[in-house]
Image: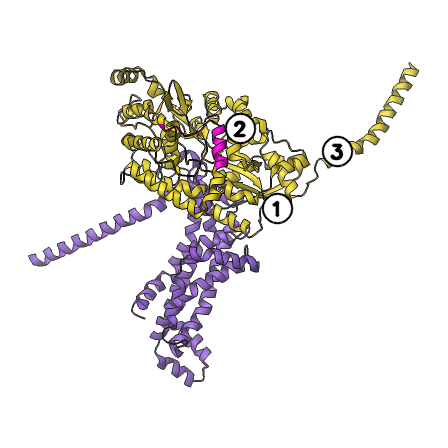
Chain colours: A purple, B yellow
Amino acid sequence: MRTLSKYRLQRQIGMLMSYVGIAVALIFFLFPFLWILTTSLKGNEDYFTFPPVWIPTEPSLAHYYRLFTHGNGWLYFKNSLAISSLSMLAALLFSVPTAYSIARFRFGGSLFSNFLLLLRTMPAIALVIPIYVLYSKLGMTNNYFGLILLYTVFYIPFAVWLMIGFIRDVPREIEEAALIDGCSRLQSLLRVVLPIIVPGLAVVALFAFITTWNEFLFAVILTGAETKTMMVLVASYTTGSPTDTFYGEASASVVLGILPAFVVAFALQRYLVKGLALGAVKG
Amino acid sequence: MRTVGRTMVTIGAIVWAMSLLIGPLTIHPVEAAKPYEGTTVRVIVNAEYVKYALTLIEKELYDTHGIKMEVEVIPADAFVTKTLLEFTSGRSPWDLIMFTPTFMADYSRHFEPLEPLIKKLNLQLDLDDIAKEYQLSNMYWGGTLYAMPLDGDIHIMFYNKTAFERPENQQKFKEKYGYDLAPPQTWKQWDDQAAFFAGWGWDGSDHKLFGAGASYKENNYSFHWWRQRFFAYGGQYFDENMKPLINTKPGIRALEELVNTIQYYPPGVLLFESEEPKTMLIKGEVPMLVSWTSTGKRVGDPNQSLIVGKAGFGMLPGHQVDGKLIRASPNTGGRSWAISKYSKVKDATAVVLEFVSSPAQSLKIVMDSKTIMDPWRNSHFTSEKFRSSFPGAGEYLDSIKESFGQTVPGVLIPGGDEYQRRLAGAVSQALQKSITPKEALDQAAEEWDKITKRRNLKKQQEFWKQQMSAMQEAGISFHPEWADK
């Protein structure tokens, strides 16, 4: 009896220690974000107050309002949303059939999927000047389509590589049954395979969205005044000796820069965990 | 009486008739004064706060000339890459370009020379109102005028009068160092005072305060702080054949002093950019600081500063050579405006440039405490409005005006930024005490040689000769013997 209660006590202490550890880690990682969030809601006079104002007594959305009315916040937010969403959809649209043909028909031979990944090994900075020159000649700078195309092409190799694992995991027999029942290949892909690989699609969608949303280099080099994205706005507030005057707007831009990616990640979280776990044992 | 009345009616009729005739004529010249009405000039800047500065004058620009500005921001980190890429492809989506004059050598071939436009449009740029030294480094390239300033970036000294005026401090200092405590005139005095003030409540409090403030971050900041002393000790970047002189006596002495005194500065000074030490100054945590002149506006802002009315301003300390005090205030680049060679509305853009940089409009920009744009015109320094804008503003503006005559430029030849960054890297390594000052500067000199060879020695020599003769004209030449004094 005594051994049992000792065991329980040890277990409870272990649990407590785990929770304390998790809480400390959460505070460590979330504190900067909390500080940015509260700064975006503070008045200018509260930035340097000592002791610091942790939670503003009169929180205000004035910095967000100014970001949208005086700056190009709203336009760049919409641009980011449109470009990220369309790139994500395009990446899914092209990667699923490609991955399907590789998984089922060994399209391109056994090394093709690995070859595709090679494209991802090239650092973006090495490509930026040739791509700028190409886009410039084709008149595709300062153009939504140009950015969407670029992000889609960049993301497809990884998406294909990821999807192959998920598709290979779907038993061929299920598809063959669908084919015997009169489905075409396309129908069996759409009606049988896709519903099974939803977690995989969620992972691809999430990564594509976040990668595109956070991308800065091409977003600044290939865009003009009308097509800039949220990350460019964030950098224009936070780089080049940022002054205290605009800390509020800078913080508001950071919060808005993070928020959509956070929402998408939150919405797809349950698929994400499942998808990552499944994808981890595929190859 | 009737005759008088008739005369009056006649005169009235004539005046009315003339007003009908002259009326349209009087409207006409006003219309003629707005030949660019409806034109949009596209402007590029490198931060939101620069864009904000332009909002201070855009309405008046529109009311005066009918010209609208469309301002685009490219973040500072990507600014040079993006703008030079656009220019090199032989076009530019912008008409008016904000740029850092350190890159003048790289940009100038894409800019429109201003002198022909001045003649053509009779522009009034009030060049006599700008210090000659500043014009040479921030507006001209190869003897051609390309740009007008926006932001007069130089360093001056700020100090907290409490630290220097407390009788207890004065007595303690004199006992320890044998001379009176006063705002430092030489780097030796600065270092003595930094050591004296470090680690105790020189303001009468129980707090452990710091000896002095600085910005030693590698990204060019450490370079600026090093050259404050380097030039005072007789340094020069290269000899006439472009052999680097940074690792000679003046450079080594300057860096050794920075390394030896770092203990008196706040922890984290190696990561400080411009704003951190400014905040420490206005919160009363450091007694003295060398910083950009815009710091004065924060010092004088009662909403954030605890030292309003207690702040002192002065020129940077220097070095005594044979009874003469040699001072060197780094010109840290700042911001200037130029007209794109590829602009389709050059005349309208020139009118905008004239307007933005006019004494009255530029004063609005440099006076506004929300901008970090520094004053640069003589008329900014003498403006009564500016001089009465906060306690001590007059002393502040006088210090800037005097310092303008002592400015030393950065490396203004092609690749100037690359040279500066290599040197800043080496200076930072020495400040971190991972290598000795001599090793750091030898290493930087080697790097400089490589850059020069890669960029073509002969071409670089030609560019350097131009800069060296401009510096000699301003009284800056190589005197390694000063470092021994």
The chain letter for the residue carrying disc 2 is B
Residues under labels 1 and 2: Cα distance? 29 Å
Residues under labels 2 and 3: Cα distance? 36 Å
The mark nearer the N terminus, 3 or 1, is 3
* Residue A73 % position (x, y): 50, 47
Mark 3 residue crowding within 10 angstroms, few (<14) / some (14–19) / many (20+): few
The one nearer the camera, B326 or A182, is: B326
* Residue B225 % position (x, y): 37, 33
The mark nearer the N terminus, 1 or 2, is 2
Q: Mark number for residue B343? A: 1
Quadrant placement of the C terminus of chain B: top left
Residues under labels 3 and 1: Cα distance? 27 Å
The chain letter for the residue carrying disc 3 is B
* Residue A274 % position (x, y): 32, 65
Assess whether residue B476 is covered by the magenta stretch.
Answer: yes
Q: Mark number for residue B277? A: none
Give the magenta part as a residue range: B465-480
Front of the two marks 1 and 2: 2
Assess whether residue B111 is covered by the magenta stretch.
Answer: no
